[in-house]
Image (spheres, rainbow, N blue to C red):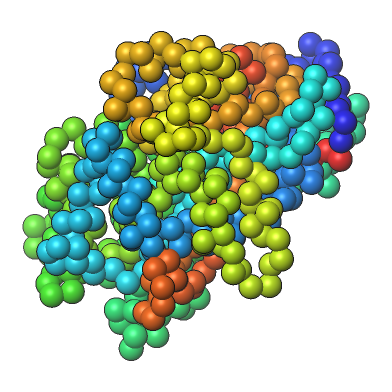
Amino acid sequence: MSSYPSYPPNLTAEQLSYLITSFTDYSLSHGLIVRPAPTFIPTNPSNSLATPAPVTLWPSPFPRTHFEEARSLQPFCNLLYARVAADQSWLGDLSTSLSLVDDFISKLWAIHTRLKSENGYHHKYSLGLFRSDYMVHTSDSEFAPLGIRQVEFNTIASSFGALASKVSDLHRYLWRSGAYPPTADYINDLSLPRNEALERLAEGLAKAHEVYIQDVSPDAKYTLETAASVGPNSSYGIMFVIQDGERNAFDQRWLEYHLTQKYGIRVFRVTFEEIRKYTHHVRPNYELLFVPPHAFDGRKQQVYEISVVYYRAGYGPGDYPGQEEWNTRYFLEESRAIKCPTILTQLAGSKKVQQVLAEKKNLEKFMGNERGEEGIVERIFETFAAIYPMDESEAGLKARKLAFEEPHRFVLKPQREGGGNNIYKDKIPEFLRGLEEEKWQGYILMELIRPPEVENLVMRNGEMMQGKVVGELGVYGAVVWKDAEDGEPGDIDIVYNEEAGVLLRTKGSSSEEGGVAAGFGCVDSCVLVD
């Protein structure tokens, strides 16, 4: 594909008014919403007000071949990061060095070392709900796509899967209902792929729930099929660890609704502050028991054994304002419940790991013997942008020179998840000068990806904005594994491993950050072009 189509089509005032009305009503009717920011609506009594999520009015063009390649790679990326998480020695070397310059990484690693020296881990299985983010990389002003380049790999709180599914449904509805004009003939059933991220992510959680019960109660002969027919009267449940005042609650709620309605699994939403009030361990196996405060009527209380702890919080320092929150994370980590993610899996998602895996010898260490897949190392490696350490190695000294002499080509990334953390282009030298040099090694320097620009309209807080945008494609993966009982470090036994849908995030081409929750981007869907 040498160029993108002229996009979007011009509309009359009547066509645009009809399209916006259809868009808004569908969004509100189908839960494609977020809670408004306090700056937008200062008072929100009982948290009862909501607004349509920031979404593009049109699906954005994306090359079909690159879309399909990114999705086909995801099960192998799942394997790669599960194996990294299972190799405690290899991951430990990186985490130990990062701990010297990054307090957040240090505290995560300290939980692991404390567990290993005290009671050890009690969970047998791990769950990853991952997302690998890509941009199309172009070579010149003609925007001829060279291929996809990985922006980052997320191992914790990979959000917006549910809303991404609903945006895909929204854009398909607008086409099917005739809200898009006939001149947009490149929008059709074949070019608008259905996005099953909501169903597939919920299925990953449900599979981990099933594996947990089968492991702790083999005589129960529990399966998801039998549980769904009975309904949610089991004494087991899944715990979502959430942030207080979560604006993106609806994205999480749709996962909860799907788990309850399809699989008969109860879900409990609990903040770090609430966990120690309502949960406790039962030794010697460290089952995690939860007593919902709303289920106590003064005479009888319902106790649930938590099968899966799913973190939608805990990915940044702001979630741990004091030692009590770190104690709570340790308390959860030592329990028997399956964690999504474990401490080690969260550490595997650090930017330093991404940088080190971009060295082919390290990629080959984990993926070089993949059976039945010729060339998988090369296919994954081709998605990597140039990434450098910022330490005192030969490559690190080269990166430091580039950061000061050619900063316009790069982005500087800390070991953080969520939007708003990166330092871009000409801001890099000033930032580094203001940072102690020994702290530089806590960052990685990544060559900027140059995605093609297209025109689109974005609806945010009821206002329409039009201009040039760029897209970032996230591919979700769901994987359940356990460390192999006999084998080398990093050897794992896979129980479940699937690609789990996509997320297209779009932002203004002049915006450097792309996080939707952080206020920089919006949720989109793909119209595939050849």
Q: Is 152 displayed left or right of 191 in the figure?
A: left
Find residue 46 and report its horizontal and vertical position in percent: 30, 29
Q: Quadrant of the N terminus?
A: top right
- On the image, the x and y values in percent for residue 339 come to 33, 59
Specify whether residue 24 is in view: no
Q: How many marks?
A: 0
Q: Is residue 78 above or below residue 517?
A: below
- Expressed as whole percent of the image width and height from the top left, the position of residue 205 reads 44, 60
Up-down relation of residue 484 to residue 470 (above or below): below
Query: Residue drawn 13% across and 75% down?
Result: 284
Q: Nearer the viewer, residue 254 or 514?
A: 514
- Pick out the residue farthest to the left: 298
Residue 87's image quarter? bottom left
Residue at 70%, 61% in the rendered image: 375
Q: Nearer the viewer, residue 514 or 361?
A: 361
Left or right? Give the position of 474 relative to 16: left
**Eyeballing the image, is 219 above or below 91?**
below
Q: Position of residue 48 (x, y in %)?
A: 37, 29
* Above or below, 318 relative to 234: above
The residue most toward the front is 394
Question: Residue 429 or 405: which is nearer the viewer?
Answer: 405
Left or right relative to 134: residue 401: left
Q: Residue at x 35, y 48 (%)?
A: 94
Q: Quadrant of the C terminus?
A: top right
Q: Is residue 120 visible?
A: yes
Q: Residue at x 83, y 47 (%)?
A: 190
